[in-house]
Image (tube, helix red, strand yellow):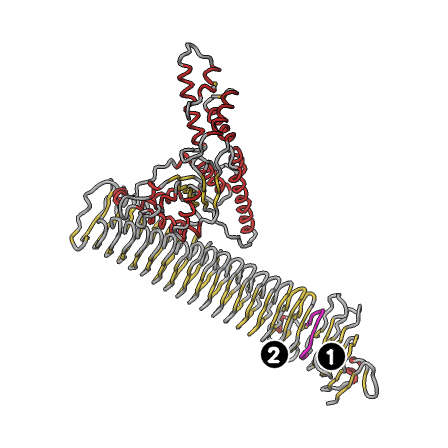
């Protein structure tokens, strides 16, 4: 081995150009380059090592500007570059280092900047993807940095085998690494950051193996596999990618092991076409869309993998996609945990889904689900099965949902085997219209609604089910419900164990009822069959009492409906926001309130636009405190506010239910909670307006039933936070004390609207409004006298603002009628005119 020396100044036995030294070198020689900058093209056509004499970064080699040729062209075998800075001569997009077909090069401790490494290999179809033997292009990049490249940091095409060890790829105006044909890349301890495009893009039969590496801030997907490419990622972190972390399409296959995929702009994992994905021990967190989006005929198998806080459904399946999950965990997320659509198929074994925004497991269309030994907790609905295909749950549990535990709504056969449902805020299991259900074993317990609801026309087959300690009926049979119920237990229900609606005809064999509020309530026309059933150990006869069991139970628990004309207060469907705000502007006075409402409308519109743009919404409490004296328009504005929220799409109905203490507080223990609940349920989708709300927390009374009403209100505001707006109203001084009476109130009522007393001129305008509604008008003298009367009227506790103006109108019409009764034939003008003489004396 001979060492050839290169220095910028030349000299005895030394070369001034690297290319001259390479041409003079023999196989196995070393070209030692002194510090300096060299502008030339170096062709490595033999086994030569070019290295920096003074260490990394002291030698800068750039290509010839305008030549269109790479700075280094590798044509030989076993060539090497060590400790060099290899820079693009210009921004023409020419590769910095080109590696020809069949060549081989070691790039060690180098900085490659301004361009890419482009390695080409033979793409002959007969050689396929076999990268063994002669004729394969080989590249080993070690402890080097590829920076500021255009188009790509590395472009590998054909029969190329590349190893990358302890390297950095950064600031690439394009893709990090492109592989096509039969190219194969093995990367370990790679740090890639700041690519404008994909991190890796594979096409054809390309392969990539990445271990112990980090990909951060890629402009598009972290890893894209297309066509028939394959990938293996182990202990790889993909963070803040502009697209998905891993996107697989065509017939590509990828295997992920112990990977961390975080904070993607799109779905964390995307699998489509006929692609296959396998993941084990991975975490997919904070995805900008789905955690896993799989479509077409793609397949995925995930083991011991976790999905946290997805912006959309954690797993979304469509078409004929298939997913199998083993020992996986889904936590948080704005929408569903698993949402299977089309004819997709999902299998879950030993999985957990907790605290998602919508349904934990949602299966619709013709999709199939088989879940075994899974745990669902929190969130809205636990399981929603509305598929025409057969589905099954075995040894699963659903707990703590804010809605129903399990909803069955599709025409496909559903089998529930040893399923446990507990602590739901609504019914435990609802067998909805059209469902075909078989339940074996299992428990429904401690639910706030009925345990099992069998809807109209549904006839399930149920064996060995236990319903215990639910707040309503154990089993509720709707009209024309049927089915066979064998060896079931209903224990400790607060309503009668069974409710049998008109036309229901279930067959109940060996049913055991214990410690319930009653055995059964049966409507007229119900026709149940009881065979060897008992209540508290005593043989049970068919219930003799007719009449509504639900009505009787409601009366016993004090849940008589709130007397409010719901239909009359329902806003029209075609009402626009502009219409509602225009009506508010027409109201007399209320200038401060109008400004507050306009401000809230703008805030809500901004929130909606941010949500539609995929941005986080600022905190927004829709619940309000109306503070002011009586008659200042609080009820009117509350009604308008509900209509505004409906027009903005933030409430379903926008109607107003107005209540006070008497509508919420009962007369004895156990009466208040159901009574308050009934009022709130009627307001769902709209506004509950509580007038004189401070009376629920009277001063100096520590054991008042109003405390229970407040606690129920706070709980249901949380349970229905997206479907209920509450406005509490009363005197300014009293409302602060009321809000401070319960921590739940102070955290939910953060905005107060102050209703000022009407001025004298505003009261006259209110008077004239009512007068005009009844075709009366004030004479000039009467208007002046009325204005003066309102100015001098005491503003004490008896003053009612707008109510006083209405009362004044009523009294003046009465006095006018008395005055006109003395006339034989009063004219129409006299009948419609209110005079100063009609003002009440001493008012």
| Vertical comparison of 350 with 458: above or below | below
Q: On screen, 507 above or below 134?
A: above
Q: Does the magenta stretch include residue 106?
A: yes
Q: Residues within 10 Å of mark 1 (few under 14, many from 20)?
A: some
Mark 2, other Cα within 10 Å: few <14 / some 14–19 / many ≥20: few
Residue at (43% x, 53% y) in the render: 364
| Image quadrant where one finds the N terminus | bottom right
**Inter-mark Cα distance, 2 to 1:** 36 Å
Point out residue 449 in the picture as x, y percentages from the top left corner. Answer: 32, 50
Residue 367 visible from this viewpoint: yes
Q: Which residue is drawn at 78% across and 80% down?
A: 18
Q: Is mark 2 on a helix, strand or loop?
A: loop
Given contact means CB atoms under 8 Å apart, are the residues at marks 2 and 1 in contact?
A: no
Is residue 413 something one can see in this rendering? no
Which quadrant: the C terminus?
Answer: top left
Q: Which residue is drawn at 36% across and 59% down?
A: 398
Q: Which of marks 2 and 1 is nearer the N terminus?
A: 1
The segment highlighted magenta reads 105-118
Residue 58 is labelled as: 1
**Most distant residue in the bottom direction:** 1
Dividing the picture into quarters, in which one does residue 614 lie?
bottom right
Q: Can you give x and y, in whole percent of width and height, for residue 229 in the image? A: 58, 67
Specify the label residue 132 is tagged with: 2
- Depth check, mark 2 against mark 1: the one in front is 1
Q: Position of 49 compared to 534: left or right?
A: right
Q: What element carries label 1?
A: loop
**Residue 451 image point, x, y percent:** 30, 52
Q: In which quarter of the image is residue 732?
A: top left
Give the percent coordinates (x, y) of residue 769: 49, 27
């Amino acid at each position: 081995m001979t060492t050839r020396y290169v220095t910028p100044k030349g000299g005895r036995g030394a070369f001034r150009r690297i290319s001259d030294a390479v041409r003079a070198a023999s196989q196995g020689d070393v070209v030692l380059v002194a510090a300096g900058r060299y502008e030339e093209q170096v062709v490595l056509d033999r086994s030569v090592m070019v290295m920096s004499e003074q260490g990394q970064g002291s030698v800068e080699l750039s290509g010839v500007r305008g030549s269109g040729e790479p700075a280094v062209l590798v044509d030989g075998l076993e060539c090497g570059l060590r400790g060099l800075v290899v820079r693009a001569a210009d921004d023409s997009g020419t590769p910095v280092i080109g590696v020809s077909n069949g060549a081989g090069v070691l790039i060690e401790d180098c900085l490659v900047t301004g361009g890419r490494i482009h390695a080409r290999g033979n793409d002959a179809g007969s050689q396929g993807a076999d990268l063994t033997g002669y004729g394969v292009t080989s590249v080993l990049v070690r402890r080097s940095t590829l920076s500021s490249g255009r188009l790509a940091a590395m472009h590998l095409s054909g029969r190329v085998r590349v190893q990358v060890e302890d390297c950095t790829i950064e600031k690439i105006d394009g893709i990090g690494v492109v592989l096509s044909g039969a190219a194969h890349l093995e990367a370990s301890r790679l740090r890639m950051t700041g690519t404008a495009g994909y991190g890796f893009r594979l096409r054809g039969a390309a392969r990539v193996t990445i271990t112990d590496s980090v990909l951060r801030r890629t402009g598009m997907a972290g890893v894209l596999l297309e066509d028939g490419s394959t990938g293996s990622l182990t202990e790889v972190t993909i963070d803040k990618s502009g697209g998905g972390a891993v996107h697989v399409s065509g017939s590509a296959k990828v295997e992920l092991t112990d990977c961390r995929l975080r904070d993607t702009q799109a779905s964390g994992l995307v699998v489509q076409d006929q692609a296959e994905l396998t993941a084990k021990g991975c975490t997919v967190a904070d995805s900008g869309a789905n955690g896993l989006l799989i479509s077409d005929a793609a397949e995925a198998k995930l083991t011991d993998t976790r999905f946290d806080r997805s912006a959309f459904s954690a797993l979304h399946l469509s078409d004929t996609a298939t997913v199998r999950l083993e020992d996986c965990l889904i936590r948080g997320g704005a929408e569903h945990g698993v949402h299977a659509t089309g004819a997709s198929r999902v299998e879950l074994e030993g999985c957990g889904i907790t605290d998602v925004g919508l349904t934990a497991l949602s299966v619709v269309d013709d999709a199939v689900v088989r879940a075994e030994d899974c745990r669902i907790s929190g969130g809205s609905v636990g399981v929603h099965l509305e598929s025409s295909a057969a589905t099954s749950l075995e040894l699963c549990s659903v707990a703590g949902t804010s809605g129903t535990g399990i909803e069955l709504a599709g025409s496909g056969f559903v089998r529930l085997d040893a399923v446990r449902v507990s602590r739901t805020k609504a019914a435990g299991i609802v067998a909805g219209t059209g469902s075909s259900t078989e339940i074996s074993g299992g428990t429904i317990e401690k639910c706030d609604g009925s345990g099992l609801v069998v809807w109209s026309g549904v006839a399930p087959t149920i064996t060995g089910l236990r319903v215990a300690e639910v707040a309503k009926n154990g089993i509720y049979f709707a009209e024309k419900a049927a089915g066979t119920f064998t060896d079931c237990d209903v224990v400790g229900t607060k309503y009668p164990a069974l409710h049998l609606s008109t036309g229901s005809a279930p067959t109940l064999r060996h049913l055991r009822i214990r410690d319930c509020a009653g055995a059964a309530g049966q409507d007229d026309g119900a026709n149940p069959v009881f065979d060897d059933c008992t209540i508290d150990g005593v043989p049970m006869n068919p219930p003799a009492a007719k009449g509504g069991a639900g009505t009787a139970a409601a009366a016993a628990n004090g849940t008589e409906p709130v007397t409010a004309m719901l239909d009359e207060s329902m806003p029209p469907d075609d009402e626009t926001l502009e219409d509602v705000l225009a009506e508010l502007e027409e109201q007399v006075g209320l200038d401060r309130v109008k400004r507050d409402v306009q401000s809230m409308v703008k805030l809500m519109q901004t929130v909606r636009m941010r949500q539609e743009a995929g941005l986080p919404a600022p905190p927004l409490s829709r619940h309000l405190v109306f503070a002011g004296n009586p008659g200042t328009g609080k009820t009117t504005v509350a009604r308008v506010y509900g209509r505004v929220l409906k027009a903005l799409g933030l409430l379903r109905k926008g109607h107003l239910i107005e209540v006070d203490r008497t509508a919420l507080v009962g007369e004895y223990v156990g009466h208040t909670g159901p009574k308050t609940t009934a009022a709130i349920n009627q307001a769902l989708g709209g506004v509950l307006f509580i007038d004189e709300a401070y009376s629920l927390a009277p001063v100096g009374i520590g054991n008042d039933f109003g405390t229970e009403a407040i606690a129920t209100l706070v709980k249901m505001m949380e349970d229905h936070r997206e479907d209920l707006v509450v406005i509490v109203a009363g005197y300014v001084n009293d409302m602060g004390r009321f809000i401070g009476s319960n921590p739940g109130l102070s955290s939910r009522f953060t905005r107060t609207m102050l209703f000022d007393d009407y001025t004298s001129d505003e009261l006259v305008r209110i008077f004239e409004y009512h007068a005009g509604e009844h075709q009366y008008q004030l004479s000039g003298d009467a208007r002046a006298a009325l204005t003066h009367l309102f100015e001098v009227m005491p503003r004490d506790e008896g003053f009612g603002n707008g109510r006083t103006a209405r009362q004044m109108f009523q009294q003046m019409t009465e006095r006018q009628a008395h005055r006109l009764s003395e006339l034989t034939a009063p004219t129409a003008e006299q009948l419609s005119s209110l005079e100063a003489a009609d003002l009440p004396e001493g008012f």
